[in-house]
Amino acid sequence: MTATVPPAPSAEGPIGDPRGRVELPPGAVPEDSRFVNADLLPVPVAERRWTTYNFAALWIGMAHNIPSWLLASGLVTLGMDWKQAVLTIALANVIVLLPMLLTGHAGPKYGIPFPVLARASFGLRGANLPALIRAAVACAWFGIQTWIGGQGIFVLLGKIFGGWTDASRIGGQPWTLWLCFLLFWALELAIIYRGMDTLRRFENWAAPFVIVGALVLLVWITVKAGGLGPLLDQPSELGWGAEFWPVFFPSLMGMIAFWSTLSLNIPDFTRFGAGQRAQIRGQALGLPTTMTLFALLSVFVTSGSQAVYGAAVWDPVELAAKTDNVFGLVFALVTVLVATISVNIAANVVSPAYDLANLAPKRINFRTGALITGVIGVLVMPWKLTATPELYIFTWLGLVGGLLGTVAGILIADYWIVRRTVLDLADLYRPGGRYWYARGWNPRAVAAFAVGGVLAVGGSHSLPGKGPFPEDGLIPLLKPLADYGWAVGLVAAAAVYLVLTLPSGRRGAKMVP
């Protein structure tokens, strides 16, 4: 391959504004280009109007969900006390905030979603590699969150309507559970099908509603317990010495991985931002503070449940179901429904909708991509994935989570260090331009992805009989890196990409065979 001089800029350059936001001039990109559709084109500056509150509400809505509530319980089960668990969760979310802000920068500036930003580093065709990996994770998560939400509704309705849970079975589950799952699934798709502005309005009121729901649960259990119980007085089984750190670092990586997928596709949301200040302040206010507060609420409520029932009840649905008050059950039902819809649509539908649109822009738009996501979310049979956590956690999330870290490393290195946040907006949609590389693929990004991916997931291992991997790891030499897969993938891929790219002096150059 040989490098050629980058093509000359268009006679009609991009249009900027005082806030540093850029948009395409009319006619800059041919409408018949196979890499263009209305959902992938930059959001016009006039329509970039999400404020600090919109971004904070987005994160509040996403953080307040059943899996987030259960994070602290997982750490306490490992031997931490509540203070260590909350500290780990808080630190992880401060760390993951950094790549969120770095990749989110391109959104308000250029108005582009994640798969279009990935074209700058991977190439117009190569961007489908990270986009489809991200979409696969999101589709599976969508199915699992929908199943968990459906189960929550099923349990609470069972308390309201006697006999609901004793219905005849289909496929090993009561038909009423299947009904809850399918109705919940349809409601989620109906909301996202109306577009991103509907999602923004939903998140605006869902966020405070879910906060109130969690506080009501705290007040109820505190009054019932006459205090917050003995859980807060339990000492750590690990201490702060040699036994603590081998548990802390893998746990920290796990907490980071919880939101690492969003660190890739956050431009899908920030592209609607009124400016950089809105996305920076909104994310900083919304993510680490909310997750820490939610972890505290989880610990306090569970402590109260231990005092009342003699055993810690970490699942908020199971705890809410213990009340015989019909109004309380209905309120808990609505809170679970709103909380799960809020996180599932934002975190697991928006991304694959854009990613699938990027795969075939002329055949798939945002709404079609959302519907495909919903169908795949059912086809992965989430009821089986949640029944066998080793399959999902160790095989699916472990492998793909490490690969997503490599993508984040390449995107950040390319956008901030190689290009210094300067993109040719029109060439992101034009074959033959500076991001065409070798027939639409950037070999340097693919090589960095391969190296980072091997280092991130090559040491994957399982305890005997507990998972699909060898006890000594797929590649025994890399086993010590396995617990740090996301961070290893990010750093290694970024380093390899910079080594391959910067010395060439051909930043953004078109590559031809």
Image: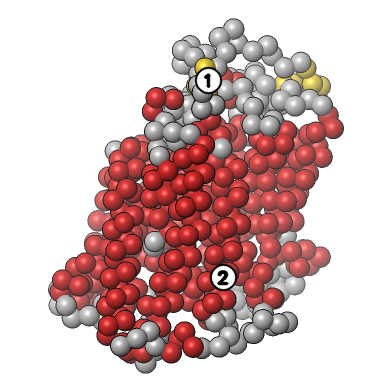
Q: Residue 116 is drawn in which quadrant? A: top right
The amino acid on which the numbered mark 2 sits, given as a three-letter code, is Leu
Location of the C terminus (image quadrant) = top right
Location of the N terminus (image quadrant) = top right
User: x and y percent of residue 244 in the render?
Assistant: 67, 79
Q: Is residue 494 left or right of residue 329?
A: right
Q: Residue 433 is drawn in which quadrant? A: top right
Q: For numbered disc 1, what is the local secondary structure?
A: strand
User: x and y percent of residue 295 in the render?
Assistant: 46, 69
| Residue drawn at the location 49% of the way across and 30% of the way down | 111
| Residue drawn at the location 30% of the way across and 40% of the way down | 198
Q: Do the numbered discs 2 and 1 sit on residues whose CB atoms are within 8 Å?
A: no
Sequence-earlier tag: 2 or 1: 1
103 vs 113, nearest the viewer:
103
User: x and y percent of residue 479 in the render?
Assistant: 75, 67
The amino acid on which the numbered mark 1 sits, given as a three-letter code, is Gly
Residue tagged 2: 87
Residue tagged 1: 16
Q: On screen, 458 above or below 38? A: below
